[in-house]
Image (spheres, rainbow, N blue to C red):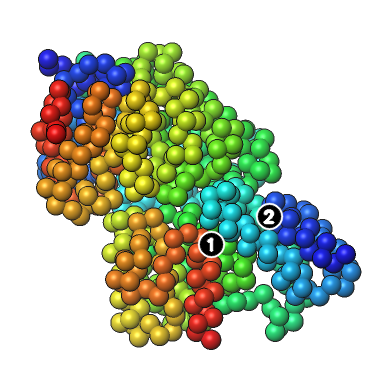
Amino acid sequence: MTMTSVERVVKALRGEEHDRVPHIELIHDKKVREAILPGASYEEFIEHLDIDGILLFDKLFFWKHETVDEAKGLVRDQWGALTHFSTEALGHPVERAIKSEKDLDSYVPPDPDEEWRYTALKEYVKRWKGERAIIAHATDVFDIARESFLGDVLYYESMVENPDLVDRVNQIVLEYNLKSIRNQIELGADLLSVTGDFAMTKGPMVSPKHTARFLTPATQKQVELGHELGVPVFKHTDGNIWKIIQLLVDTGIEGLHPIDPMAGMDLAEVRAKYPNLCLMGNVNCGATLSWKSEEEVRQEVKECIKKAGYGGRYICMSSNSIHSGVRPENYVAMVNAIREFGKYPLELD
Amino acid sequence: MTIELFEKLTKSIIEGNHEESLRLTEEAIEKNIPANSILQEGLIPGIKTVGELFSNGEYFLPELLVSGKAMSRAVDRIEPLLSKKEAFHIGRYLIATVKGDIHDIGKNIVIMMLKGNGWDVTDLGVDVSPEKVCNAIREGDYDIFGMSTLLTITMPAANETVEAIKEAGLREKVKIMIGGAPVTQDFADRIGADEYAKDAWEAVTKAQQLVAGAS
């Protein structure tokens, strides 16, 4: 049984029979790509390693950024936050869009219907539709509303002291995201990813009660739109999510990434408790992919597939992304190991 | 009566009610209760409980932040009333996220907990070079320098920072602490830090131990 990459990814998410464990990533850092295939475009890199899909990370593909100070790496993101770019592909807001609730009265959100946002997506659809998975993306509402709009302190304090402010900001972001998701899927995306951390190494950022009140309802609306438009959806959050994992599952997601090993999440334990969920990730990009040997990478991939691959609901990925600190040879070893050990029926014992 | 007021103050900190903590502090001042007693018997037991609740996973970031706000509002009110000897000042703490790392939430929580427990904190920010750290230590009068690294790839920068402090002849001037998701006691020992803290509350208690040990 052979099938296309997109069939493989979608079937893994839906728990349908397929030929081998698929592989995708949220982000491939440019430095790592360049070391593996010098001078190549992202598309050529994806084809060179025969990766099963391409994820169009919204901050990199669909967002508008204005340069403020090139030398200092400062840009203003489309929501109005001053963002600092360091060594990684994604920046970090240093000054928020909203200083007080009053600023919201005159706030004009970005327009998700602007044509230019979807240029790359259209090219990928033309190049790969029906072959490789084209993955729509939305940074989750909690992430944007907290990081770009209010900042950690005001957002968290407002959850307790001024929930209406959190609701107002969340709604602005949600409306944008829903339009953006609709546009991406109607233009040809095959599945939807919603990323944004809800947890830290020790546990959730906010209590399960606050998670259910402020975080997961917006995630669920995005998941429901994906389903309405006929595509499966996965959610990414780092951290130890045991206290909120049921809330995440209840949003209706088909897949969950990355079952963070650095936060003590165990792939086998999650597999045992959620047999109908497609598990994604878990190859440790903080340690194994960054500084261990290629053989250790190979063994870890084998172990991940062994823990989560039986039954088909597993997509092998790194535990976050292929960031700038990943050894290029280790990433190649990971891709090769997925091919070596991931053929169904699995024979790993 | 006074004990009851202290209990209410402690409760207002634990519940993160900054209006109540300020109101009760005013009430205590009007009743001529010494500022140092308000601090030691009303406020500090509250923030200590908050730290423990966070450490035990019963409190999360929102609860921690509103409690920190309730504490700082009350402390701001009584600080001018404390004598120099009583001043709410355990020590001076210099803090930074290491070079190459732009994550600041963990560092900011530690800052809040330190301030709430009487530390004078100077924040150098994120992505801070070893040179900048050395300059700050040289020019300031700090008891402790604390650094955080959230990424495995920036852990070597923590080592470089410690080495730079040694090379600059400043190692004896400050105690060094380290924390962050990928950091372990073993790593802290390897790079020669004085203490490793696994969370914000441990950062506070270990900082206090370091200063107590130094005196």
Q: Position of residue A194 (x, y in %)?
A: 40, 30
Amino acid of disc 2: Ile
**Residue at image point 53% right, 49% down:** B57
Amino acid of disc 1: Trp
The chain holding disc 2 is: B
Q: Position of residue B192 (x, y in %)?
A: 33, 75
Q: Quadrant of residue B161?
A: bottom left
At numbered mark 1, what does the secondary structure look like: helix, strand or loop? Answer: helix
Front one among B47 and A272: A272
Q: What residue is disc 1 on? A: B201
Disc ID at residue B14: 2
**Residue at image point 51% right, 72% down:** B207
Q: What is the C-alpha distance between the residues marked 1 and 2?
A: 15 Å
Label 1 and label 2 in one chain: yes
The chain holding disc 1 is: B
At numbered mark 2, what does the secondary structure look like: helix, strand or loop? Answer: helix
Q: Kindly tell me whether residue B168 is visible in this rendering.
A: yes
